[in-house]
Amino acid sequence: MGVFSRISNMFKSKVNNALDNMENPIELLDQKVRTMEENLNNAKLSSAQILGNVHEIEKKMNVAKQESKDYDEKVKLALSKNNEELAKKALQRKLDADKKFDSLKASYGEAYKKAETIKENLRALEEEIQKTRSYRDEAVARFNNAEATKQVNEILANVQTKTNSINIDDIERKIQKKESLAEGLGDLKKVDTLEDEFKKLGDTNLDAELAKYKNTSNTSTTQATTSNSTNEVDLELEKYKQSQKEEN
């Protein structure tokens, strides 16, 4: 029996825990308010009959009191007319009205006390409903705040777990490796550029070579022109010499 009892308690415990996790406290408060409002409405309906009885008894008391007063006047009238027999009959009616009034008065006292007790209970229930509503509104705000805080903390906890955390050091190493590679490629580009600059020093400057050719051509032309001029002068000089010889 001990083993089965423990198993039963364990099962009940797990069921209760599962139910606790499934229960929404706000929904429970809403249901509580609805139940209290239904009870209040039912209590008002039941109380209406009792309160109505109080008013009915009160009316009957007034009628009995008026009858007693009327028969009292009739007794006096009959006696004033020396009609004792009629006075006795009227007096009997008055006494019956007084007894009826006394009986109704006792019933009225009991019904009135019950009615006042019911009214107090209804007021207390209404106050309790109002308090529950106010607490419900406060609880909604607290519950929503707690739920939002829980979700934020769960997100933060999930981010900070080892399985889902991002290793900043590894990322930094990878970035630095990429940066170093980029810098190395940049250095290689600079070396290539320097070699190209030295190669350019050894390259033939076409403009300079063309200028040289122009200078050479101009020099040859000048020399040829000068040579031609010299030959012409020599020829003329020879002509002058020949002419002078002939004159002599």
Image (cartoon, helix red, strand yellow):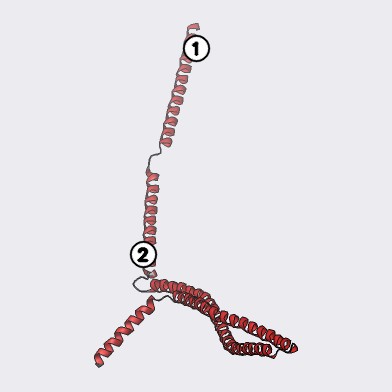
**Label ID, residue 240:** 1
Q: Position of residue 47 (x, y in %)?
A: 53, 80
Q: Evaluate whether residue 131 shows in this view.
A: no
Quick one: quadrant of the N terminus?
A: bottom left
Compare marks 2 and 1 and give the one earlier in the sequence: 2
Residue 188, by quadrant, is: bottom left
Q: Nearer the viewer, residue 114 or 61?
A: 61
Reading the image, the residue beneath label 2 is 174
**Amino acid under label 2?**
Lys
Q: Is residue 118 above or below residue 24?
A: below
Q: Is residue 245 shown above or below 25?
A: above
Pinpoint residue 217: horizontal percent, then vertical percent.
42, 28
- Is residue 84 among the parts visible in the rendering? yes
| Vertical placement of residue 163 versus 115, above or below | above
User: Which image quadrant for residue 75?
Assistant: bottom right
Q: Is residue 136 above or below residue 94?
A: above
- Spatial CA span between label 2 and label 1: 100 Å
The residue type indicated by label 1 comes to Tyr
The 10 Å Cα crowd at callout 2, few under 14, some 14 to 19, many 20 or more, is: few
Judge from the rendering whether residue 144 lies leftward or rightward of residue 165; answer left or right. right
Q: Nearer the viewer, residue 218 or 7?
A: 7
* Mark 1 residue crowding within 10 angstroms, few (<14) / some (14–19) / many (20+): few
Mark in the foreground, 2 or 1 = 2
> Outermost residue toward the right?
80
